[in-house]
Amino acid sequence: MKKVFSLILAVTMLFGAAAMVSAQDKTYLERAYDGEFKGKIVTLDGPFIDNDQVLFEASIKDFEEKTGIDIQYIGNKDFESTIQMRVEGGNAPDIADFPQPGGMANLAKKGYIVDVRDFISEDWLKENYSQAWLDLATVPNEKGEMIMGGIWARNNAKSQVYYRPKVWEEAGYETPETWQEMVDLSKQMVADGETPWCLGIEGGAGTGWPATDWVENIMLRTTSLENYKKWTTGELKFDSPEVRRALEIMSEIFFTDGFVYGGREAIATTNFGEAVKPLFYDTNGCMMYSLGNFITAYFPEDAVPGVDYDVFYLPPIDEQYGRPFLGAGDVYSVFKGHDRDEVKATLEFFTHGESLKVWLANGGAMFPGKDADPSWYANATDAKISQMINDATSFSFDGSDQMPAAVGSGTFWKGMVDLVTGTDIDTVVKNIDKGWEQ
């Protein structure tokens, strides 16, 4: 009898070991699709509300149905302030969507964030993301060790210029390949009786921020990535040759007579969403507009991408700095104590373009990974911008979003308004730098 029992036990252990090996051979995501985590709940908190929340939840529905995992999304407009309190108060969600990497980095430094490479193949991450994205997610933990604090699940783009191809074709204009060509083209447009640029930096409490995107784009094109990073941390001051030069280059576009629709005096009082409307005027409008890809929400409803409007890459300035791209995005992180298998599987799911497919088809979002099929995008223009990002020599996160609020959304925003309304650069940079002291 003992022999029989021993044999049964041995067989049971053998099959158990085989099952364990089999499970270990599969990724957490594969195990999820096998139904291993059916009935499990994963909580996710983030900034998506209103239509964004609808599109997010529509994008994860297929995953939930196929795996049986219930992703319970919380979401609130004050996420960036409440998540810090929730985590430090012991009430963290399983996964958090940080729209700014600084929030994730802060919690990682305090020891709350899991290194995603502990459960997602680093080979896969390197295969699907450019090194720029991986670097942006790599931050020090509480021991000073570098961890990958999250994965990038969504992004937006800020280094493109919108124009009307039919109008340009009729006028004989070609898209510029260098910054100087863009300036020369602007001058030619003025000579032809056209207005090159639409500009508007009014945004209620956020007035000034559209101009910060211009400064950031120019900084990436005129100085090193190391200097750009130092600038976002205050090590490189606004009162420096690098930033002064960026402001001077921006000023040529903003303040040259005839370059801007409505003139310099209209820039600070024109809402950024209203500013784009003259781009679509049949006569007496403007020829170019540069802002994040979300701006298409302000385009005429019947405007057809690729026909009524298209994009070109905001050109490089100094050849040595390549073709950088500016943008922002959402990094998803898992908190320590919440790294259950179903949570790991869910985070792995978000490393695949499939996780954003529904949203891509509706417009307003882009996927930072390489496995998103261009045909998934709402239109060819969005797909074109996504390819520009993939082809860029570097991708950098919005600079003002990385700065402390006293500077990034404080003195920097105000400084741009002051510059536009006539304050000299010397005064502007000194006043912005005062924000670092707060």
Image: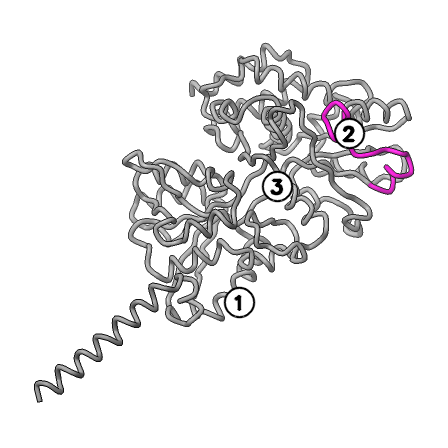
- Name the mark on residue 197: 2
* Label 3 vs 2, first from the N-terminus: 2
Q: Which region shows up in magenta? A: 165-182
Position in image of residue 338 (x %, y %)? 32, 54
Label 2 amino acid?
Trp
Side of 34 where 12 appears, left or right: left
Label 1 amino acid?
Asp
- Residue drawn at x 44%, y 62% is 71
Q: Quadrant of residue 385?
A: top right
Q: Residues within 10 Å of mark 1 (few under 14, many from 20)?
A: some
Which residue corresponds to mark 3?
389
Up-down relation of residue 325 to residue 419 (above or below): below
Label 3 amino acid?
Ile
Q: Quadrant of residue 389?
A: top right
Measured in 3D between alpha carbons, the distance from the residue under mark 2 to the one under mark 1, in whole angstroms, is 43 Å
Up-down relation of residue 73 to residue 87 (above or below): below
Which residue corresponds to mark 1?
62
Whether residue 207 is visible here, answered yes or no, is no
Q: Secondary structure at mark 3?
A: helix
Instruction: Look at discs 1 and 3 and give the one toward the viewer.
Output: 3
Position in image of residue 73 (x %, y %)? 46, 57
- Residue drawn at x 54%, y 34% is 396
* Label 1 vs 3, first from the N-terminus: 1
